[in-house]
Image (tube, helix red, strand yellow):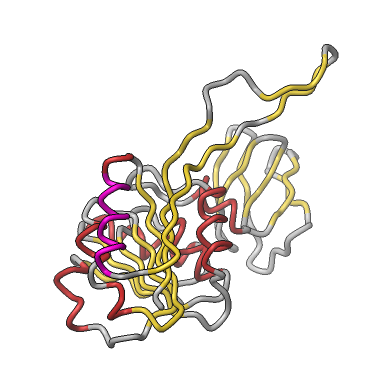
Amino acid sequence: MLLVRGDREFLVEPGEEMGTDLGVLEVPEDVEPGTTIETHLDEAFRVRRLRGPDLFHHFERTGAPMVPRDVGLVIGETGISRGDRVLDTGTGTGVLTALMARAGASVVTYERDPEFAEVARENMRLGGVADDVDVRTGDLTDSVGELEPSSFDVVTLDTGDAPDVVEHVPELLVEGGFLAVYSPFVESTREVVAAAREADLSEIRTRETIQREMQFDDRGSRPSTAPVGHTGYLTLARNE
């Protein structure tokens, strides 16, 4: 649950007691979203259910997680939905992993760093998808032989060795399944595209992800003059 007061948010468990500068909060075991609870100093907080976009702000981080707009592109472009089986590597904080599971998919995800993997497991519990996500510690390229061929609807990669993984994608995806690779640099994106062509994947395309906020004031309306919101490159391909 989230306890919200203005622009302040506190992540709590039902039954938890938490101290704040506005007083001590005692969260009832049966607390419901939409109710109000007060600290011992009579300061009120609204109770809000944790939703997908909140995970980006409240997951424990082990690096820079994929931002919500890019998660939306991955899910929208691949059509991830209930009943799909997704293979993911480069778990990190696990924002993409959790949101794919919340969309209804069953996810197997690989994280090389044992400490990062443990944090990701706790984040999956926090996100309410621990039963739908199998966080495995290790390198996917070392475990390809252990995976059942043609058993995944989507493969998502957010890792430096993505080009090496792409060569195995045709044997892992079902016919018509999708590959989505998120890369921070043009150089690695070029290598991913080359590997996808070598693997004879189809419908290969890459998009730069950019988003600008709008400003509205008394003088008029225009895009923000803040730096352009580039976050990375998304390469998509299909197994035919």
Residue range corresponding to the magenta coloring: 188-199
Please name whichever residue, 160 or 131, is drawn nearer the observer in this view of the structure: 160
Residue at the spot 63% in from the left edge and 67% down from the top edge: 29
Quadrant in which the C terminus is drawn: bottom left
* Residue farthest to the right, as pictured: 218
Residue 164 in which image quadrant: bottom left
Does the magenta-highlighted stretch encompass residue 25? no
Residue at the spot 58% in from the left edge and 62% down from the top edge: 76
- State the image coordinates of residue 121 (x, y, percent, origin top left): 36, 65
Q: How many marks?
A: 0
Residue 192 in which image quadrant: bottom left
* Residue farthest to the left, as pictured: 142
| Left or right, 43 with reference to 2 | right
- State the image coordinates of residue 71 (x, y, percent, origin top left): 51, 55
Please name whichever residue, 11 or 233, is drawn nearer the observer in this view of the structure: 233
Q: Is residue 132 above or below residue 18?
A: below
Magenta-colored segment: predominant secondary structure? helix
- State the image coordinates of residue 92 (x, y, percent, origin top left): 33, 54
| Left or right, 139 with reference to 154 | left
Q: Is residue 236 above or below residue 191?
A: below
Quadrant in which the N terminus is drawn: bottom right
